Each structure stands twice: as C-alpha cells, then as structure tokens.
Amino acid sequence: MANWEAFRVSDVVKKISNEEFVLPVIQRRLVWNEEKMELLFDTLLKGNSFGGIICIEEEKGSEPLFAFRPFSKEGHPLSSVQREFLNKGHMLVIDGQQRLQTFYIGLLGSYEGKQMYFDLFSDFANLEYSFKFENDESKLPKYDQEKEGIKEHMWYSAKDLFRRLKETQDEDQVADEIIRLKHIVNETEKNYVFRNVRVFYKNIFSATNIGVSKITVNKSLNLNENRQRVVELFRRLNDGGTKLSSYDLTASILKGFDGKIELFLDVISKENDDIGLSQDTLINLLFVLRDTPMKQMTEINIEDAEFATKHFSRIQKTIKVLKNFLKAVGLYSYYLKEKNRSFIPLYFIAYNIFYRTPLEQPLDEEMFDNFDTNNSNFQKIREWLYKSLLNGVFSRGCGWIPYKTGIRKISSIVKEYKLKDFPTDELFKVYRSHPLRFYDIRTAYLNEFDREIVFQMIYDEIPSIRENDIDHIHPVNILRSHGYDEYEINRIGNYQLLDSVTNRWVKNGKSLGEWIKSNVSEKDTYLRKHLIPADETLWEASSYRDFLKVREELIVSKIKERLSL
C-alpha cells in the first residue's frame, strides 16, 4: 500500500538532516557527478518534473528491515548501522537517493571539497540557470559570451543563499542584501539578482515539488520475506534513471539478506584497491569460492550472504596470500589497478589458497613464504599462471569466452582438488582439448606469446610498458636496406625496452654496434639486462638472422629460468 505526499525541497533537506530520511544498506553509494548535480538544480528552478521518491515507512519501536545509514553531507561513503529496534520512525529511500543526496549536498554540504555556487546573473528570461561546484570562488568562470543578457557571471554560494533565505523567509530582503554586499548599482544587474533569488526561493521554500510515495510493509509476512520483497521492488525501480549494474543489484540482494555484506564488500575492496579488486570482482570471487561461478541473480540466496560473512576473515587472508604470491613471482606490478587486467586466473589461485586447509582450521598464511623447489604447490601455480598469461588464455579474442566457458571448465576441475596441490597439468589438458591456442616454451613459438608478459619476464618485473618504450635493437631502416622482410624485423627477438627519450632522441636509428660503442657506458650490464648476445660479430646487420636466433634462445632460457623449468 502506498500514499503520496508532496514536500518542499527545504522540508526534505531538513528531514535528511534529522535522519527522518535514511538509506537502506541495499542502496549503492552516490554515483552522480558534479555535472548531473548542477543540472538537477537547473531542472528544479525551471519548474520541470524530475520524478517521485519512493520510500518504505518504518515506525518507532519496530525492528528495521535493513541496516541503514544517513545521507552524506560531503558525498563520502558512510557505513550502515544495524539497530535491533528503532528509537524513532524514519523512511527508507528505495528510489530517488541520487536526487535527494544532490539537494542535501548542494544546499548544506559539499562535494569533494567543493561547494555549489549559483550564478545570480543567470538568464532567467530563457529559464537558463547556472550552477557550478568549486572549492575556490576565484576559479569560477567570469564571462560567458554565449549567454543571453548579461555576459558576466555573478556567483554566490548556494549554501549561504539557502541559509539566509531560511533565516529571513524574505527573498527581496536577501536580494537587497546581496546587491549592497556586491556593490551593484546597475539597474539591469539588480533586476537579475532579484529575479534569480526569487526563483530560487520559490522552488526551494515555497513550491511543493517533491512527490514522496510512502510504502508500508505487510506485517503479516516475516522479516526476511519483507526484505526480499523490498529488494525486488528496488531492482524493478532501478530499471529506470541511473541504472544499477548487474553487480550493484547483486550486492543489493546480498545486503538484503545480511547487512554485514556492506562491510565485507567495503573493507576487502578498500584493502585490495592496489590490484583493482573492486566490488564486482569480489562478488565474482565469492561465487567462485561457493562453487557456483555461473550463478544467476535470481539464484542468489541467504546461504551466499552467510558464506561471505562467516568466512570474512579467511577471504581477507586468502587475498593477502594471493598478493604475496604475485610479488614472489614478479607479477604484482602487472596486476596493479591501473593496468586493468583480467582477474579470472586469480580467482582460481585464490580458490586453491582458500581450500588448501579445511575450513574449520586456520588458513596457512605462510604457505608461500617458502617458494623454493621444496614448495611444489608454489611451482605449479607459478607455471600455470605464467603459461596461461604467455599464451593469452584469458585475453579477449583468445578463442573462448573466458567468463562463460573458461570459468565453468576450470571451476569443475579445481573443485576436485580442495586440500591438494594446484591441478596445473589437468588445466593444461583443458586448454589443449578446447581447442585453445597453447604453446610450449620454445623459440619457434616465442612470437606467439603475449609480448607484455615476455617483457615482464625478460626485465624481472617492470613498472610499465608503453608502446614508445619498445625499441628495435637493429633499426628498421637498416634491416630493410639489407633486404630483410617485415616478419623478420618485427620479432620479439629484435625488441628491447628503452625509455622514450633515449629511444627517440639518443639511439634514434643508430646501428647496434654504433649505439653500444658510443652511448652505452656499462656494456656488460647493458648486455645482461637486455639479453643481447655478447658476440660482437652478431651486432652487424649482415649477421641479423644469427643474432635473432641467439637472442631468442636467450629469451627462452630466461623464461624457463623464471619458471624453473
């Protein structure tokens, strides 16, 4: 059952301040940016409709449906709290939080340290109202040649304007105060200030332009049934507006079963932001650990939420061990957040770590502290991960759909190896039987491998690879002049990494021999670092094919050394 009631913006902001409007744990964070918030205020002053607000009304003394949190005055994420009983009634905002949050921030708070300003020289005649977020008024634009009427801007803090209008309830008095404060003497400019202050006052303090639908829950149903009905309502309502992603909706469903899921997602995501473990990735990992990697949204149940909260600490420790493993094998920098790598292979390494000991026993957090030849599991995982990455198994366009096909096949194998070493050989059989492009470590296949991973292994974990860092050891023009074709020239055996300045301005097409003799001060160090053959007869373009053969053998040896094969 729902009842509609109209509110003024000022009423709603007051209720938000008094925590009469709150957000259930199933709600996502603020996702609107400055531009969207500015446009909402423009829409408000135009008098246009911007949709209703849907709330669940909860009475004082009742057991709340969900953990809940207040609106954020600064836009920062706040944690939800769980109450056994409500000491005062409130309304849970199910739809419309972005709009309400915008009004609250714009009129009482700030966004990322910036407060909102209203241009009191806005073109009211054409219903064009300008708002801007800024942390320093002096940074705001001074003129706009495209604007009708007055070309200048006269920015005024929306927060200060709201406060003063609330105190006086007299728009003309406030406009007159601003005119005197700003020393405005031009009659046209005075009129603009009066008209803009009036329209601001009208749409925030006078007009009842926010429709709120209050929905009451069916008290004949138990708490969990009502929660799921509300989550379903939430899902349906969010088919419009700023749509939630499938992962946002999945998170909301899980939170609907247990409010502690919010803490689970927030804490673990924040702890592992360095490797880009987002809420979405963590939800995928949760379902992989549950042996349900392909779970559909409609199949999510309370056991999924209980698994996450019950094993919160173990999952935290699992990811910590996973990162230690990445550091030990030289792939931590490869998986840094800004690289935006596929997390798929890491799901299964985490799975093996999580189930390496029985769940009723503590996780072995030191399982990879010893990664010499005595640690067979370390060796197996390292070989599987590197060979998978070298062969681009989890890259787009690699011949299968990694999430739908790969995860299902790999998951079916790793679940049979709980409490055992990682099933490297069995997974390689999956690759070969798919069929999937999968090559052994040989010089003949070197150019089929993922180039960035090859560089990662040559240079013992490099911080970044940009296209202009890749240099032809034997310059292209010189090789072409000797009759070599493009296939021979553009091979991994003829690539090295140089910083862009050295590549473009210092080496700049010099022959290998000339470059080393003229510009390389530590020749032996340079040769070792870049795996350049020490035989100087191979530095001549006429011996390029022999150079290529020897250097590709050096690269393969380095890869095998990294894999201890």
Image (cartoon, grey):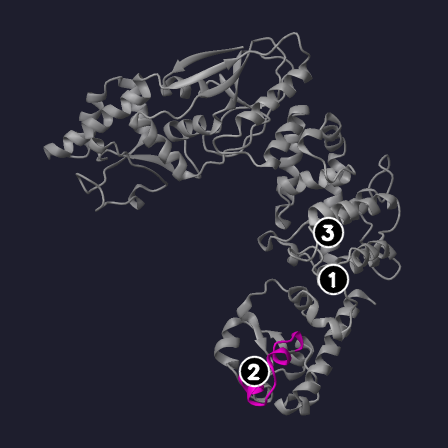
- Residue under label 2: 475
- Could you say which quadrant of the image residue 521 lies in? bottom right
Spatial separation of the CA atoms under disc 2 and disc 3: 37 Å
Is mark 2 in CB contact (under 8 Å) with mark 1? no
Is residue 488 covered in magenta? yes
Mark 1 or mark 3, which is nearer to you? 1
- What residue appears at the point 55 percent right and 30 percent down from the top-left corner? 78
Packing grade of label 2 (10 A; few <14, some 14-19, many >=20) is: some
- What residue appears at the point 43 percent right and 28 percent down from the top-left corner? 99
Left or right, 146 with respect to 389, comes to: left
Residue 237: image location, x then y, percent: 53, 25
Q: Earlier in the sequence, mark 2 or mark 1?
A: 1
Spatial separation of the CA atoms under disc 1 and disc 3: 17 Å
Q: Is residue 437 above or below residue 518?
A: above
Magenta-colored span: 477-493
- Amino acid on which disc 1 is placed: Arg
Which SS class for mark 1? loop
- Residue under label 1: 437
Evaluate whether residue 378 shows in this view: no
Packing grade of label 1 (10 A; few <14, some 14-19, many >=20) is: some
Mark 2 or mark 1, which is nearer to you? 1
- Residue under label 3: 345
- Could you say which quadrant of the image residue 281 lies in? top right
Q: Is residue 424 above or below residue 443?
A: above
